[in-house]
Image (spheres, rainbow, N blue to C red):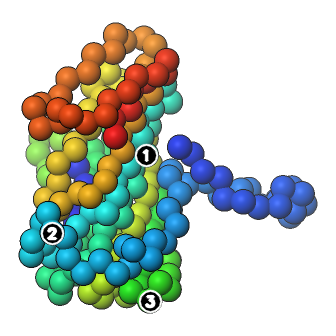
Amino acid sequence: MLSRASSLFLVPAALLSAITIGIPMVSWAIDFQPVSPDELTIRNEPKAPGAPAIILYRQVDRNDNDAHQDEYVRVKILTDEGRKYADVEIPYWKGNLKITKFQARTIKPDGSIVNFAGKPFDKTIVKARGLRILAKTFAMPDVTVGSIIEYSYRIELNSEYVFDSHWIVSDELFTKRARFSLQASPFFLLKVHWRGYLRGQNLSRTSTGSTSK
């Protein structure tokens, strides 16, 4: 089971038609990347020998101005054991966080795509006095060895918590590539701290935030 402790894209549509029939344009947290032939042919990862699955790409875009965080994950299933990562949990703190703009799909080894057409359901994972942590859980469709699973979603934050921005960069699965960005709040002094294992990474500053690649 894959558990997550997460650019705005508007799906192309004919504006005139949308106005005429009254259907709004759909927006996702982060749109899916194009299917890569190289990713479809991956059979193993030399930097993670024997890994049942690997994270091909992960993106986290934190926006403290609008109090939300967008997350995108793309996972390659390498073995039968790795198929367990098709069962996904996205933990969140009920009452302070909300999961929206969710989408998911499976890319089969032949490149065909199966969209997740269901709806994630809530499961309580921690319950104590004054505290309840839930998880949005869902099972990816038609997952076999060689499949790629990917999903994206938005975490809508309680505005009282935007001062404590942080990225969880490590994962139980080996990560080939990741991108993290922060649009900092103008009401707080921005300080960036990281541990030794991030040395050598590309950290760039902009007028609106910081980005690490």
The vertical placement of 160 against 95, above or below, is: above
In this view, the mark in front (3 or 1): 3
Q: Nearer the viewer, residue 120 or 12?
A: 12
Q: Position of residue 89 (x, y in %)?
A: 26, 63
Q: Which residue is mark 1?
A: 70
- Assess whether mark 1 and mark 3 are in contact (beta carbons under 8 angstroms): no
Eyeballing the image, is 43 above or below 171?
Answer: below
For this view, does 179 lie left or right of residue 186?
Answer: left
Which residue position holds label 2?
Answer: 46
Q: CA distance from mark 3 to mark 1?
A: 29 Å
Side of 176 relative to 162 (left or right): left
C-alpha span from label 1 to label 2:
30 Å
Instruction: Classify residue 21 by image quadrant.
Output: bottom right
Disc 3 element: loop
What kind of residue is marked 2?
Pro
Please provide percent x and percent y for residue 46: 15, 69
Q: Amino acid at mark 3?
A: Asp
Q: Residue at x 45, y 27 (%)?
A: 183
Q: Position of residue 72 (x, y in %)?
A: 40, 55
Residue tagged by mark 3?
110
Of marks 3 and 1, which one's residue comes earlier in the chain?
A: 1
